[in-house]
Structures are given as C-alpha cells and as structure tokens.
Amino acid sequence: MVRIPLSAIPNQEFNIVLAGQNCTINIYQRDVYMYLDLYVASEAVQRGALVCPLTSIITVSNNLFKGALYIVDNDKPALEQQIPEYSGLGSRYQLYYLTESELKEYGHK
C-alpha cells in the first residue's frame, strides 16, 4: 500500500509512479463532492470519478491501470467515514494506492 501525498487545496494535479505505471492524477472539489481524473502514460483511465471513503475510486475496468485508489477519513471509524473536502486532504483524508495482490489479500476482486 502506498500513501499518495496530497495538499489541502481544492484543485491539484500531479505525476506519480505507481507499481511502474506513470500516472497523472487530478483531484478537485466541485460543490460538496470531490472528483478524480486518472491518466496512465497520458491515456485517460477514468475522468470525473467520485471520491468516496473506503470505496474504490476507479470504477472502470481496463488494461491501462493495475491496482486501485482509495481515500480514507482518518478521523472517523469505518462506518462513520465522511465525504472528503479539500481542506482535509493530506491530513484527515489520505489517498492510497493498492496493488492487485494487496487487493486480493484484503478480499477485493
């Protein structure tokens, strides 16, 4: 599991290598919801993915991206997780990347 560093700003885009995949992540706040765009090697994997705690952010199946992205609310137990807001990114809300083998280990498909 890799913790992806975030800043407490409403719109951010950055490049990161995840399990050998050259990724560009764009995370942004619109009204009360947060969204994420993911590109691998400049090809769109998913755009406008709703960011909800403890739920896989990438919901499309394709061969471009291996693994999963999850956001966790560190201030609340699992059943009380709150929808993230930008002011808590990087502190209260942490973004994680899990490899396919880690997903299997935790019981995900």
Image: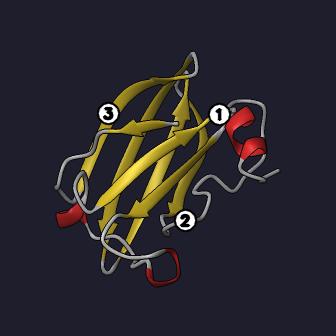
Q: Badge 3 is on which residue?
A: 14
Q: Position of residue 99 (x, y in %)?
A: 65, 33
Q: Nearer the viewer, residue 65 or 82?
A: 82
Q: Position of residue 83 (x, y in %)?
A: 40, 76
Q: Position of residue 81 (x, y in %)?
A: 44, 77
Q: Taking 87 as reference, is 98 above or below it?
A: above
- Left or right of residue 68, residue 78 in this image: left
The structure residue drawn at horizontal position 51% and vertical position 59%, both measured from the top left corner, is: 48
The structure residue drawn at horizontal position 21% and vertical position 60%, both measured from the top left corner, is: 10
Q: Nearer the viewer, residue 77 or 97?
A: 77
Secondary structure under badge 1? Answer: loop
Q: Position of residue 44 (x, y in %)?
A: 59, 38
- Residue closest to the far right: 109
- Residue closest to the far top: 20
In 3D space, how far apart are the residues under numbered discs 1 and 3 (Cα atoms)?
A: 20 Å
Q: Badge 2 is on which residue?
A: 54
In the image, what residue type sits under mark 1?
A: Thr
